[in-house]
Image (spheres, helix red, strand yellow):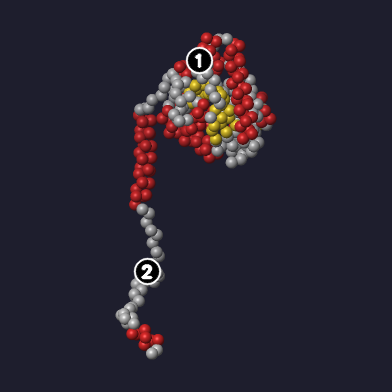
Amino acid sequence: MSQDEYRDMLPGHTEFRLPEPPPVQRVNGRRPIPEAPEPPAVAVEEALDVWDQRVAGGLAFLRRRLAGAYEVDEFGFDPELSEAIFHPVMRILYREWFRTEVFGIENVPADGSGLVVGNHSGTVALDALMLTVALRDKHPRKRHLRLLGADLVFRMPVMSELARAAGATVACNPDAERLMNSGQLVGVFPEGFKGIGKRFSDRYKLQRFGRGGFVSAALRTGTPIVPVAIVGAEEIYPILADLKPLARLLGLPYFPVTPTFPWLGPLGMVPLPSKWLIQFCPPIPTDHLRDYADDPLVVYNLADQVRETIQATLHELLEKRPDPFGP
């Protein structure tokens, strides 16, 4: 018996047939292009819902602004404007450009008043703005920092309104004490223009802290002082020279010359992408020293303690960050 005859005797062999292939439909003489699978309807609906919420929120925000249905405090602070406009813009620099890392946020009071005292540098006061973002994003209670600014800021027509809307006020003892008495977190930079206007060769060397007015305000209100060290701002606009005659002509405390400014024009205002580290130090209590707010010796010693704490912390942070422009 041959193999063909044996296969023919197997049951079901003759009934088995391979399925016919489906006919190919042609479109204009060509094979149809396979269609991509449609995304799940749930994902599309969720994406639409997110954008619907954003558009609705934006329209509601504009409606409130146009109608004047928003609140500001006695200093002009506008929390809604800060959350919707100022902080989202600053977060781009804070997270993506400067790659900021924060340490010791637990040292900032969770409730009540606090005086955050930091070193000042960077030609433009971006360190103050980054400090506000750090406290808003990293603090468990998402606290706002009320900055004390120089008189020059509040003499400029547009800058004055923006600064007050962002929560800043004039750096004077009466305003600082009112803020702290109301339980606010206040930020001050005692170096002032001497800090942000110093040359690159003097980077991370603290300048004189003035007369210690911030210490007197803290003592009168019994507010704890939180020293903070900021590393990274010195490299964003390295000052190589200061054109003092031009600064006097323009009414400015200094006129910086950097590797990019004024040579590159407006592009010279783009900060260099340095790596930032911010360290909040343990708070210094002052409630037991209320009666010594007018004692120059106590005020000077406490201001010197704050200054030495910040300077020592700066050295520690610089060891953590060997490359100013590293990851």
Left or right of 79: which side holds 204?
right
Q: Earlier in the sequence, mark 1 or mark 2?
A: 2
Residue drawn 68% across and 30% down?
201
Q: Which image quadrant for residue 49?
A: top left
Tell me if residue 175 can be seen: no
Q: Quadrant of the C terminus?
A: top right
The residues bearing labels 1 and 2 have C-alpha atoms spaced at a distance of 86 Å
Helix, strand or loop for disc 2: loop
Q: Could you tell me residue 122's position as x and y percent?
A: 60, 30
Q: Could you tell me residue 172's position as x and y percent?
A: 52, 17
Q: Quadrant of the N terminus?
A: bottom left
- The disc labelled 2 sits on which kind of residue? Val
Left or right of 35: which side holds 94?
right
Q: Could you tell me residue 166's position as x and y percent?
A: 47, 27
Residue drawn 55% across and 36% down?
100
- The disc labelled 1 sits on which kind of residue? Asp
Residue drawn 50% across and 26% down?
108
Left or right of 4: which side holds 197?
right
Q: Which residue is mark 1?
A: 287
Q: Which residue is mark 2?
A: 27
